[in-house]
Amino acid sequence: MDRITIFAPATVANVSCAFDVLGFPLEETGDRMNFVKTNQKGIQIKMLGNSNLPTEPEKNVAGVVALAMLEQTKVDFGVEIEIDKRIKPGSGIGSSAASAAGAAFGMNLLLENRFNTTELIKFAMLGEKLASGTAHADNVAPAITGGFALVRSYEPLDVVKINVPNELYVTILHPQIEVKTSDSRKILKKDLELKTAIKQWGNIAGLISALHTSDYELLSRSLEDVIIEPIRSVFIPLFYEVKKALAEAGTLGSGISGSGPSIFALSKGKETAEKAAKAMQMVYSQTQIDFDIHISKVASQGCRIIRNNNE
Ligand code: ADP
C-alpha cells in the first residue's frame, strides 16, 4: 500500500452528562487525507484549499502523530500527508482530533497495521497535546473506534466502544464566535455537592444503558448535564433559546459540543434532525452571528478508507 485516501470524522465530545468521558463521530462531516509513501525520509504536510494551519510537521497535529509513528517503527521511507480540512479549527467538533486520528489511522495502513486500536489512540493523543496542551482522548478515541467511545480510564488507557442505536442522528449548530478552551476550563468549579454528583452519574449510567438497549426515551431522560452546561452556556449566545426550540422540535436532548461554541442535538430519525436544524436556524437568524449547521447520522465507524490507489 503506497498511496491511500481516508475520511477522518468530526466528533462530538462531552456528550451532555458524560463530560470528558464520552464522544461520538459524525458520518458525513469530516476531513479527507491522502497518504503517499516517499523515498525522502520524514513527514511532509500539505494543506489543500485555503487553510492557514501550519505545514511544519512539528506544529501540525497530523505531523506530530506521524513523526512519532515513524520514529517508533524506523522504516526506510517517508510519508507525504495532504489534508483537505473541512472541519473549521476551534469549532468544538474535533477539528484537531480529526487530523490526529486520521494521521494515526492512515499511517498505520502504510505501516501494514502494526499498531492496535489502543496504540493508535495513544499516538493520536499526542496531536491533542499539541493542539490544546492536554492529551485528552474523548475526541480521538471515537474518531478511531467509531460508535460512542467511553474513556473509562487514562492510567492505564481503557477505551470502551459502545453501540450506536440505528436511527440516531445529530444536528450541530456552529456559531462562528471564538470560545477559548482555556477560558471554558478556567470557569469550571473545582468542587461538587454530593447530591449534584449523584444526579450526574445516574444520568451517565442511564445514557450508557439506553445506548446498549436502543431505548430512545431513556436516552432522552438521561441527556441532562447539571454540572458543566449551566456554567459554560454563558459563552454561547442564545443557548437556552436554542435548547428550548430544539425540545419543541422533538429532539431527544441537546448540549454543548466539546468546549463549545457548537451546540449539538440528538434525534431519533432524520426527519427530526432536519426539524432541529430549522429550529437552530430560526433562533440564530435573530443574531448578527454567522453560523453553520451540520446534520449527520451518528457513525458506528470512525476513520475509514475512501480510496486505495493500489487496488
Ligand atoms: P476543535 O475545537 O474543533 O476541537 P481544536 O481547538 O481542537 O478544534 O483545534 C484547533 C487548534 O489546533 C488550532 O489552534 C490549530 O491551529 C491547531 N492545529 C494544528 N494542526 C491542526 C490540524 N491539522 N487540524 C486542525 N487544527 C490544527
Image (spheres, rainbow, N blue to C red):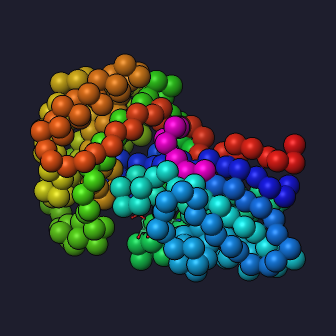
Assign the N terminus to one quadrant of the image.
bottom right
Residue lying furthest top in this view? 271
Q: How many marks?
A: 0
User: Residue 36 colored magenta?
Assistant: no
Is residue 113 found left or right of 64 in the rendered image?
Answer: right
The span shown in magenta is 26-32
Is residue 133 found left or right of 113 in the rendered image?
Answer: left
User: Where does the image place residue 71, in percent across and percent down from the top left?
Assistant: 74, 80
User: Where does the image place residue 116, in percent across and percent down from the top left?
Assistant: 71, 59
- Asked whether residue 94 appears in the rendered view, the answer is no
User: Where does the image place residue 96, in percent across and percent down from the top left?
Assistant: 48, 62
Q: Residue at x 82, y 77 (%)?
A: 40
Of residues 245 and 39, the one nearer the viewer is 39
Is residue 47 found left or right of 41 in the rendered image?
Answer: left
Assign the C terminus to one quadrant of the image.
top right
Of residues 280 and 229, the one nearer the viewer is 280
- Residue 87's place in the image compared with 292, above or below, is below
Of residues 209 and 16, the one nearer the viewer is 16
Residue lying furthest front in this view? 50
- Asked whether residue 28 appears in the rendered view, the answer is yes
Is residue 172 found left or right of 83 in the rendered image?
Answer: left
Of residues 149 and 276, the one nearer the viewer is 276
Q: Main secondary structure of the magenta part?
A: strand
Q: Residue at x 49, y 51 (%)?
A: 86
**Quadrant hosting ligand 1:** bottom left
Q: Residue at x 63, y 66 (%)?
A: 46
User: Where does the image place residue 183, in percent across and percent down from the top left?
Assistant: 23, 70
Q: Residue at x 71, y 50 (%)?
A: 5
